[in-house]
Amino acid sequence: MSPTTHSTAIQSAIDIINQNQGMMRMAEAVRAGIHRNTLQRMAECGVVVRESRGLYRLADKPPLGNPDLVTVTAKVPKGVVCLISALAIHELTTQIPHEVYLAIARNASPPQMDYPPIRTFRFSDKAFVEGIEQVTIDGFKIPVYCREKTIADCFKFRNQIGLDTVIEAIKFYKGQPKRNVQALLDYASTCRVSRPIRPYLESIL
C-alpha cells in the first residue's frame, strides 16, 4: 500500500472516529469500514490511544476524566450503570467506587472484560428497563438509572452493598432539589421492596 493510500485510509478513519465522539471499539470501527491494519498503524503512529483492550481514542482528544465508566459502557452498550456507581454520578454517596457497577438483563451474557474492574447485577425485565436516563460524562452519553430508581435498587441489594450506604443515599437525596418521592415509591414497588423501604423514607424524608 502506497504512502498516499495509507494517508487516505487514516484520514478516513479519523473522520469516522470523530463522528463517534472520538472513541470507538475495534468491532464498531471494522463495521464502519476501518480496516484492522489501519487502526493498528494509527496506534503505532500515535494517532489513536488504546484506552483498553479493543477500545481506541483519538490522541488529540482530551484524556477521559472518568475512563472506567466510559470504557465499560462503550464495551457493554446494553448495560446500565447502577448501584454505587450510579450513586456516585448522582452525588448520593461519599464512597468512591473501585469497580463499575453495571446492571444487565436477566438473560444477558456476562461481559468478558479484564479491565476496568466491573461488577454485574442481573435485573428482571421490568426492573432493568425502568428509570434509565442518559448523562453526559467526558462528552459521552452514559446510561444510568435515575436517582429514585437507584435508591430503590440499592435497597433491594442492601445485603450486598450495605444498609448504611442506602441510608446515606436517602439523606443526600433529601438535600437535593426536585425530589420525586412518589416515583421512588413506584420504583420500590417494581423492585419489590416498597414495604420494607417505607419506614426509612418516612423517618428520613
Image (tube, rainbow, N blue to C red):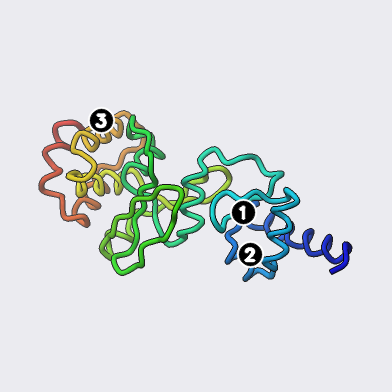
Observer-nearest residue: 3 or 22? 3
Q: Amino acid at mark 2?
A: Ala
Dot 1 and dot 3 residues touching (CB under 8 Å): no
> Upstream in the sequence, badge 2 or badge 1?
2
Q: Is residue 117 left or right of residue 39?
A: left
Q: Relative to residue 8, is residue 89 depicted above or below?
A: above
Of tags 1 and 3, the one toward the viewer is 1
| Residue 169, disc | none
Q: Amino acid at mark 1?
A: Tyr
> Upstream in the sequence, badge 3 or badge 2?
2
Q: Quadrant of residue 85?
A: top left
Number of numbered discs visible in the structure rendering: 3
Q: Which secondary structure, mark 3?
A: helix
Of the 4 image quadrants, the one containing the C terminus is top left
Give x and y (percent) for residue 120.
33, 54
Q: Which residue is mark 2?
A: 29
Q: Which residue is mark 1?
A: 56
Q: Is residue 122 left or right of residue 78?
A: left
Give the Cα distance between marks 2 and 1. Answer: 9 Å
Dot 2 and dot 1 residues touching (CB under 8 Å): yes
Give x and y (percent) for residue 181.
25, 42
- What residue is drawn where x is 42% and y is 60%? 112
Give the Cα distance between marks 3 and 2. Answer: 44 Å
Of tags 3 and 2, the one toward the viewer is 2
- What residue is drawn where x is 79% and y is 59%? 11
